[in-house]
Image (cartoon, helix red, strand yellow):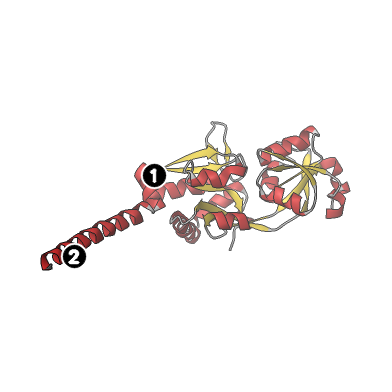
Amino acid sequence: MKRRMMSLVLIATMIAGVLSGCGKSSAASDSDLEYIKGKGKLIVGITDFAPMDYQDDNGDWIGFDADLARLVAEDLGVEVEFTEIDWDNKILELDNKSIDVVWNGMTLTDEVASAMACTKPYLNNAQTVVVKADQATQYSTLDDVKGLKFAVEAGSAGEAAAEENGFDYTSVTSQADTLMEVEAGTSDASIIDSLMAGAMVGEGTSYADLTHTVDLTTEEYVVGCRKGSDLAAYIDDEIKKFTDDGTINTVAEEYGVQEALVK
């Protein structure tokens, strides 16, 4: 009987050791930072969204967010890869590991906060109405724009603002596409980020005959990582470092967003 008891104790000890080892392995594999370092690449999910992420004449991705992501990847010791995504599928793209992070002027919403590990806000923003410049005086208040037909990016804060205000709207693939809709006259107006409007519409831009009028919301940008990811805290530390040494202000000034930095 004593021998049998000793055997049972030995088996229990071995099982405990195996489970303990599995626990340690699982904890290590749960680290997004280690996963990204292991594959040697940080995959950043973006859309074409100046001044946050857009392509230069050589086809390279640049912008305020693109430059910051590149700096973070450099500190991680990995390459950076920018991948255009369907904004409406950003959470799915994260969860299935097609991308590692959403870094594209993403507004902090209840949906984003519940589905992702988010950084602290780093830029202030608003959703603003864009119309033809020669019609701007007709659409200077919320009441003025209520009867317009809008173009919005699917899954965006602009779409949420249209729903909240009961606007008639069509969802398209990107914010850039909403401007094309207004330019072509297939929509009366679009709703886009004010930071994008500052870079993309008005005199000296690609859409000189468009302008923005009514701000519908005020909001903040965050970077989104997989739920439970340790990458979000790492990016927070990086942004604090870039803030303290002046790097973030230098990058912001290059893209004209310095006034929107969260202080």
Above or below, 233 relative to 200: below
Which residue shows up at 57% across the image and 39% down it? 85
Left or right position of 107 against 128: left
Q: Residue furthest left?
A: 3
**Which numbered marker is on residue 9?**
2
Which residue shows up at 59% across the image and 40% down it? 47
First reached walking from the N terminus: tag 1 or tag 2: 2
Disc 1 target residue: 78
Q: Quadrant of the N terminus?
A: bottom left
Give residue 131's quadrant in the image: top right
Left or right position of 217 against 73: right
Q: How many marks?
A: 2
Give residue 59's quadrant in the image: top right
**Three-letter code for the amino acid on which mark 2 is drawn:** Val
Which one is in front, 188 or 248? 188
Residue 61 picture location, percent across and down: 53, 38
Which one is in front, 106 or 97? 97
Give residue 153's quadrant in the image: top right
Left or right position of 46 against 148: left
The reply to whether callout 1 and callout 2 are in contact (CB within 8 Å) is no
Residue 196 picture location, percent across and down: 67, 46
Kindly state the secondary structure of the residue where label 1 is placed. loop
Estimate how packed mark 1 is, as few (under 14), some (14 to 19) or many (20 or more) residues with alpha carbons within 10 Å.
Answer: some
Which residue shows up at 11% across the image and 65% down it? 3
Residue 76 picture location, percent across and down: 39, 49
Kindly state the secondary structure of the residue where label 2 is placed. helix
Residue 24 picture location, percent across and down: 30, 57
Which residue shows up at 31% across the image and 54% down it? 25
